[in-house]
Image (cartoon, helix red, strand yellow):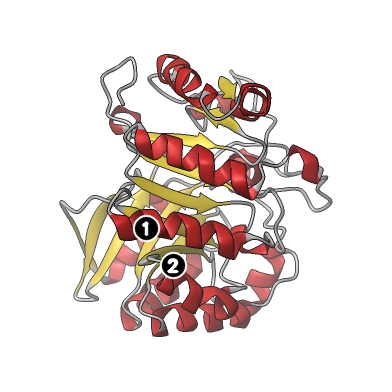
């Protein structure tokens, strides 16, 4: 598949639920209203739509949320999509999680061809972790990460950069990742949804956020690429691979290879735009074959770039949907 700008689209992110057992302050408001179950794609719909996407050239799928592992039928979703990896129809099945349920799921993930996962964790400090997540315990996440590593799954830590909150946590996080052979990715905040905070105050560029790391270690560009938008540097002599996702300070849209399937069955062609096509309605009305035509429509609608910078400086309207609906 190619979009209207000639970019090859081979990566699909599927948000399987908008629910989460954390309430991270940059992701959602403290008292969220979640979608009724009837609006969510069913297990059968998720797998059938995913299979149709694979038939059109999708080679990598990431399951996201919300927290994907809180969905009751997730073991079935993982098992069915894992078979596509085993058969060679899909190159990779991955997962983004807050890590809180990994002690329960790690062996199942490993047994069903999930070879690497991303774990969202913005600090190792127990008090700041509880503050940013509104009450979660960091040790539960650390135990889950250990369980995933023991099951043979590669772990990458996703750390959102937050001004005046976790700058001092970068060095401890980098050294923890290096000691445990985990990759680390630093992510700039993105203006999605009303979370009850001033995003200009929270935002800090990745370059500024990395200052404490540069004072102690040498950072050098790497040619490594993953399916996502991160660019990578090596941190020496720490022997750490560090990813940088910089939607605001260093736009990466020229290489975009992604589509997103939301919790309620909409295809969003860009995280920073509202344009979408409604797969759920079409599939429930006309059957799974409706996906084919809508995919072509989605590719034509995919924009060249996001509008996050304009949204942050107030010259464009902030998108109403929260990250937990669209998928991280």
Q: Is residue 207 visible?
A: no
Query: Disc 1, disc 2: CB below 8 Å?
Result: yes
Can you give x and y, in whole percent of width and height, for residue 159 in the image?
48, 60
Decide: is 6 above or below 251: above
- Residue assigned mark 2: 170
N-terminal-most mark, 1 or 2:
2
Residue that appears at 67% across and 57% down:
24
Can you give x and y, in whole percent of width and height, for residue 1 in the image?
31, 26
- Residue assigned mark 1: 210
Q: Is residue 201 visible?
A: yes
Can you give x and y, in whole percent of width and height, for residue 328 in the image?
53, 48
Decide: is 122 above or below 172: above
Decide: is 298 above or below 204: above
SS for dot 2:
helix
Residue that appears at 33% across and 49% down:
90
Residue that appears at 42% across and 60% down:
82
């Amino acid at each position: 598949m190619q979009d209207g700008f000639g970019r090859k689209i081979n990566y699909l992110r599927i948000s399987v639920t908008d629910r989460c057992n954390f309430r991270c302050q940059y992701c959602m408001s403290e008292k969220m209203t979640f979608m009724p179950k009837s609006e969510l794609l069913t297990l059968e719909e998720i797998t059938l739509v995913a299979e149709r996407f694979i038939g059109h050239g999708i080679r990598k799928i990431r399951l996201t949320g919300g927290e994907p592992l809180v969905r009751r039928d997730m073991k079935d979703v993982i098992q069915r999509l894992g078979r596509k990896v085993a058969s060679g129809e899909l190159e990779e099945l991955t997962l983004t999680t807050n890590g809180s349920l990994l002690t329960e799921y790690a062996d199942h993930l490993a047994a069903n061809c999930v070879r690497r996962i991303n774990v969202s964790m913005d600090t190792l400090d127990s008090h700041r972790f509880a503050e940013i997540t509104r009450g979660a315990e960091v040790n539960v996440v650390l135990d889950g990460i250990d369980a995933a590593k023991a099951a043979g799954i590669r772990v990458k830590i996703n750390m959102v950069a937050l001004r005046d909150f976790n700058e001092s946590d970068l060095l401890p996080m980098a050294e923890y990742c290096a000691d445990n052979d985990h990759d680390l990715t630093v992510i700039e905040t993105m203006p999605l949804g009303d979370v009850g905070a001033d995003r200009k105050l929270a935002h800090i560029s990745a370059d500024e956020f990395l200052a404490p790391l540069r004072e102690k270690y040498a950072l050098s560009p790497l040619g490594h690429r993953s399916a996502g938008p991160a660019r990578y540097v090596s941190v020496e002599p720490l022997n750490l691979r560090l990813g940088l996702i910089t939607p605001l300070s260093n736009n990466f849209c020229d290489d975009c290879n992604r589509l997103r399937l939301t919790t309620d069955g909409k295809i969003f062609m860009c995280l920073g735009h509202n344009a979408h096509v409604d797969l759920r309605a079409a599939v429930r009305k006309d059957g799974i074959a409706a996906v084919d035509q809508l995919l072509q429509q989605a590719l034509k609608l995919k924009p060249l770039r996001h509008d996050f910078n304009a949204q942050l400086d107030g010259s464009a309207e902030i998108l109403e949907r929260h990250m937990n609906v669209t998928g991280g």
